[in-house]
Amino acid sequence: MRKIIFLCFILSSFFITAQEKRNLLTDNYSKSFVSEVLVKDNSWVKYPTYKDRAGWNRISDTLRKKYIQEGEKYLDYTWPIVRATEYLAFDRTGNRMVMEDPQADRIKALQSLVLAELMEGEGRFMDDIINGIYLFCEQTYWGLSACFYLYKNIELDNGKKVKPNLPNIEDPIIDLWVGEIGSDLAWIYYFFHEEFDKISPIVSRRLKYELTNRVLIPYYTRDDFWWIRGGSNGKVNNWTPWCNYNVLTCILLIEDDPMKKTEGIYKTMESVDLFYNIYPNDGGCDEGPTYWGYAGGKAFEYLSLLKQASGERISIFQHPLVKEIGRYVYRAYIGGGDYFINFADSSPKERPRAGIIYQYGQEIDDQLLTDFGAFQLQEMKYGDELEITTLGPVLANLFFLNGWQQFAKNEPLIGGHYFPDTQIAMVRDKEGSSDGFFIAAKGGHNDEQHNHNDVGSCIIFYNGEPFIVDVGVGTYTKQTFSDDRYEIWTMQSYYHNLPLINGTTQSPGRNFKAKSPQYTSNKSRMVFSVDIASAYPKEANVDKWIRKYVLDKGKKITIIDDFRLKKITGKTELHFITPLRCDITTPGIVQMEGSDFTIKMNYNRNLLSPQIEIKIIDDEKLTKVWGSKMSVLVFNVNEAISGKLSISISNNEK
């Protein structure tokens, strides 16, 4: 759950532009059909009941013992509280974590106790589970202080309207964590309500009351949450499959009224249709692999749940778009187990949702995706290491990964791929190997989800090691999703592998975009180019800036900038960000020292002159990846109103 804290909150200003109305679900399945095929009881649940000890004993003794030992840490647990001032911190200082940390601790404690009780089945953890349930039932709001923007304004006695900065019991809202906690509590009700009744019938009644009033009724009666209907423009993002997956779980496990159940399920289908409507045809996730698990991955979980609940009568897994969305995750993989193409707010190193990848691969019959899931399960030591997170995905992994050990655990080191809609190109020297060069480059626009101003930027690895990088994003704060987002250095084009033109960096917005993308690739060479002039504001005074990346496989990478300025009004520079030590003492050559290689960057010293800026990193999330500093390699462009600049990158031994 802690991982989710950092990864998955975005405001409604970051959207993909809507495309054609595919309506993959509602154009193929009517409401009457849903009512007809919906499994009327809980027989759709494929997990053993609490009393089915033989079913739980199918899990290995080693893993069951570890879950039980983890749960024992929370026996007689002193549950943390979330104080009012910790909610207020977001409004006062922009700090999210002071509220999210104790909430995450509470959630992990409850999940650990529940999983331990399911594994052991002796009632030893039941009192502490009930304590946890009641703590959440008494808590005004299950969600995040960062999501108070979903509240309606409150009118004060003086007529002034204000947005709440504390949980408002009069206005129940559904955000990511309300959905996550609601889903967990719905599964707890399903597994234990009969056992709770033996202790006190009030427990189950209270639990059902809270889920009905906090999740079901708000979902049934409200359309003003942007993630449901997309507001006036029908635009949505990863919140839509994620929240709808959790709401669907609650509807299936808690709702008793058949008509309300059908209406609620169909509403989730209409909402998830919006998500597929806005997705690019190439399946590319413009917010990066980190978020794929909570965009395409959550959509997969939603579709899987809907398929189970309908007796497998509702399924769109064979649609080409659904398949392409699944394949994105291995197409964006660089190597080393956890390096991915990390444009936008994605992290450079990411341990993906291995169970989802494996299940997705099996569902769409994609061997490479299935093998990649098995590889990642092996990398995360699944079966030896515990998985403590939202109960629905944990249960799916426990019971739907049968046989994964028998699959080939292959790294999908594909030779190359181009996403024409999201304008991302990737290629490596040798298919099936991390040896040599790997390069990814992008076009796109500066209003992508979790956008950084990075049109035309690149990522380059050598022998599986990063040397020209996208730094990623630091710890989320209030500023991250505010009008001041682009005051954060990691969001600025200055700290991406891009030119500074006439002293001007790129601007945010849909109109600041790449033009004329071109991509060609064969066995010996890849070429990707975009005109990035339009990504800069008029102050840049640039007519043309074509950034071209050329990989001559097994030899070198060449970065070419073909530019024409309207006039010279400031300094123009080429920037490259690297974690490696740089040496600029030899005219015409920059050397970068890797762990087992030296990279040589050749440049025309009559046109370019290099210098090194050191960027100190003090954000914990970034220092875990890059350490305490990065180098910004700056090539000053000698005054010229037009020209062609070329930097050749090769292994120093060649």
Image (cartoon, grey):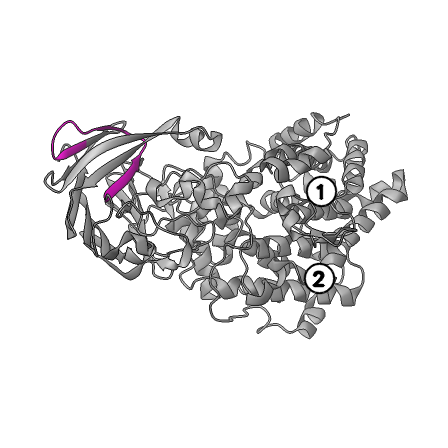
In terms of depth relative to the viewer, which is nearer, 257 or 383?
257
Q: Position of residue 277 (x, y in %)?
A: 51, 66
32 shown above or below 631 = below
Residue at figure coordinates x 80%, y 59% from the top left: 256
Residue pushed farthest left? 606
In terms of depth relative to the viewer, which is nearer, 409 or 424?
424
Query: Which label sits on residue 166?
Result: 1
Residue at figure coordinates x 54%, y 54% from the top left: 238
Residue at figure coordinates x 61%, y 59% from the top left: 226
Left or right of 566? Residue 629 is right
Left or right of 101? Residue 557 is left
Quarter of the rendering occupied by the C terminus: top left
Whole-number angstrom distance, CA of label 2 to CA of label 1: 21 Å
Number of numbered discs on residues: 2
Q: Identity of the amino acid at label 1?
A: Leu
**SS class, disc 2:** loop
Residue 407 can be seen in this image: no
Which callout, 2 or 1, points at the residue further toward the start of the chain?
1
Depth check, mark 2 against mark 1: the one in front is 1
Part of the protein shown in magenta: 572-590
Q: Position of residue 139 (x, y in %)?
A: 77, 40
Residue with the mark numbered 2: 222
Indicate the quadrant where residue 366 lies: bottom left
Left or right of 467? Residue 326 is right
Residue at figure coordinates x 63%, y 56% from the top left: 244
Left or right of 35? Residue 650 is left
Q: Identity of the amino acid at label 2?
A: Arg
